[in-house]
Image (spheres, rainbow, N blue to C red):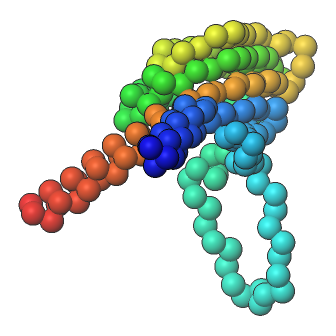
Amino acid sequence: MTALYIVGGIAAFIAFLLACPVTLRAAFRDEFSARAGYLFFHYTIAPRPPRKKEAKPQKEEKPEKSKLRLLLEQKGLSGFLSILQEAAKIASGMAKRLFSHFSVNPFRLDIAVAGDDAARTAVTYGHVCGIVGTASSLLLGNVKCKNCKIRVTPDFLNTKSRVQFEAEIRVRLFFLLAAGLFALFRSIRLIRRVKTG
């Protein structure tokens, strides 16, 4: 009987861990910042603190940065629009099933499009509205979103565009693990097909 209690306690603890959400807090003000958390564990995704440089010969070349790292390090309005478009592609592509389990609260985006010339500012404003409208509809159409506010305005008084973004995304650990296993099985099948084909 004691063994059943122990097994039941372990199963209940595992179920509790799987039901707890993983939280991602993302923001953009001049540059992208993101922090992931699970229970009392936290991890800063971006910006990463600079690594301490050790005394090395100067002849060595710097390793090339990954596409994701380069994307997250982009700054300004164009950098934010690139990140938003990539997130929309992911949400509407292979990860659509996983994104349906995401809960976003809040999602606040405020963009002021500015420029030197009023006519150029108006054209840029229309271009930005097109990108934001398409990307946000793809992204938010695949998640559960509460407290969603998006505002894009032309700013004819300033010369520099401004982006203010913040979002908090939650997903249960169970769905993340299930998506990871699904991707693993698909990749194993693909490798077998390549080997046999």
Return the x and y of residue 66 as percentages of the image width and height.
57, 58
Q: Where on the picture, by quarter, is residue 193?
A: bottom left
Q: Residue at coordinates 48% horizontally, 15% vertically from top-left? A: 141
- The extreme left residue here reads 197
Q: Is residue 170 above or below residue 122?
A: below
Q: Is residue 135 above or below residue 27?
A: above
Q: Residue at coordinates 51% horizontally, 19% vertically from top-left? A: 143
Horizontally, residue 54 falls left or right of residue 174, namely: right
Return the x and y of residue 115 as percentages of the image width and height.
80, 22
One can see residue 188 in this view: yes
Q: Where on the picture, by quarter, is residue 169?
A: top right
Nearest to the observer: residue 12 or residue 81: 12
- The extreme right residue here reads 157
- The extreme front residue here reads 1
Q: Where on the picture, by quarter, is residue 33?
A: top right
Q: Residue at coordinates 37% horizontally, 46% vertically from top-left? A: 181
Quadrant where the C terminus lies? bottom left
Q: Is residue 25 above or below residue 153?
A: below
Nearest to the observer: residue 14 or residue 118: 14
Quadrant where the N terminus lies? top left
Return the x and y of residue 72 as percentages of the image width and height.
67, 45
Nearest to the observer: residue 176 or residue 75: 176
Return the x and y of residue 80 as percentages of the image width and height.
68, 32
One can see residue 11 in this view: no
Horizontally, residue 29 falls left or right of residue 187, namely: right
Q: Residue at coordinates 87% horizontally, 24% vertically from top-left? A: 159
